Image (tube, rainbow, N blue to C red):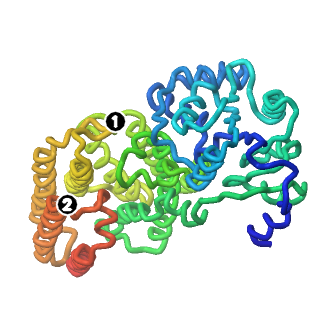
Amino acid sequence: MSQKNFQEQLLPDSASAPRDSVPLFVDLDGTLIKTDLLIESTFFLLKKQPWMLFAMLYWLALGKARLKEEIALRSALDFSVLPLQKSFVEFLNNEAKNGRTLYLATASDRRLAEPVAKRLGIFKKVLASDGHHNLKGKHKLEAILTCCKGSAFDYAGNERVDLAIWAKARRAIVVNPSIGVIAAVKKQDYIVEQIFDDRPPKAKTWIRALRIHQWAKNVLLGVPILTSHAFTFPAIAEIAAAFTAFGLVASATYLLNDLLDLVSDRHHPRKCKRPFAAGDIGLASGILGMIVLFVAGFGLAVQLSDQFLFTLLAYLALTISYSFYFKKVVLLDVLLLASLYTIRIVAGAYAIGVPVSSWLLGFSMFIFLSLALVKRCTELMAIQRLSHKTMKGRDYHVSDYSMLSAMGVAAGYISILVLALFISSPESVSKYTFPVLLWLLCPLMAYWVSRLWLKTSRGEMHDDPLIFSLKDQASWIVFINMMMVTLVSI
């Protein structure tokens, strides 16, 4: 049955009372706004003070209402950028203009709910948790019945816990329903006035959230196969397993990073469209997905060597430290990003049990430092176009662009110098049949690095140089030629 036919079946042609004479009570989390204020404020607090997790456990033992109050007291969310359910808000504005009385009824703490109500300016009163009473489920229903003195009311919500309120309401309005809500509403035969759902397809949204395209970085795990000439089936199978393990853990850390960066992402011209920042995926679903990915990734890693497992743990520790602290520290953030690329090469070597060349590590640190600086310079140019002077959530100023670009170009060319020194070293002579052919790698690298920075200075670079390279035909030509030169040299 289509959504339209479902509404026509449940909504009678005439109502028992004029619409504008019946008050409408509106849920907040997941209904009016496409996020959850408790989860959002929790991550906001944990990002600033991770040790507050222990205090949260204590507050939770005192009751969920107390937990919400204590977190709300310590949070400073930017309510002006919270993602609204736009079509539903437009509906509410029209109802308010027609004289209908609107109430905001939420289980969120009052300190978080009232600023949202003030932002919209259409609600007569706010019913919310207050530190002593958790206004959810039957407690919210009691508050609504008390407010309307037992007379008819309508209610807009999105979760299964709202079913008890819809059972007493004259009409139900369903907004971005969670799993199973529509089926439960059909089963109970509630009168549904409207259904609002502006979420994009789930599969496509989750692919974006998991950053599957970023798994391309894990190709670096296979570099030790190329440099050690270990072209055997067992080695390739182990690298494939390592690739998957790193991808799963990396996707989990991307989810964690997005949950921690909600505020800064919403102020970014492109990152504001990320699934969590835009409210296209619920925060609770994101937490669950993150846990599943971590378990799957490390479950696969334990099947490989202990050294690989420890390297993956080190990668996770570096990523979390980056998300919580180092991403806000100027220059240390780009050095850590370069390290996160390099550690993949180390992990690949441990996965197949071969030594890592110091030349390779030196080359990777400099080239990936250059790429990290490309990323920062591109972001600064985007901020400059918005007439901002600083980057929110980062310790960079627009005026830093010239210095950062100079450092990035230098790091890129130093990586070429390291490559040249390796080619002329006794190690390359002993490992390659035709080492002289390796000199062709230097002009190819020089062209690619120069082109990246030229595109960056023109403002034509994607703020993730990896995505740019994957879509750039010239980059693919360079990579393929470098691969062919290396194989022929062997």
Residue 312: image tag = none
Q: Which residue is mark 1?
A: 326
Residue at left offset 40%, top offset 52%: 271
Q: Which residue is mark 2?
A: 459
Residue at left offset 81%, top offset 50%: 171
Mark yes or no: residue 299 visible: no
Q: Secondary structure at mark 2?
A: loop
Residue at left offset 20%, top offset 53%: 370
Left or right: 2 as drawn, with respect to 89: right
Quarter of the image that includes the N terminus: bottom right
Residue at left offset 44%, top offset 62%: 215
Above or below for 137 versus 341: above
- Quarter holding residue 73: top right
Mark yes or no: residue 275 visible: yes
Left or right: 137 as drawn, with respect to 477: right
Residue 317 at x, y percent in the picture: 44, 39
Q: Earlier in the sequence, mark 1 or mark 2?
A: 1
Residue 76 at x, y percent in the picture: 47, 27
Q: Amino acid at mark 1?
A: Phe
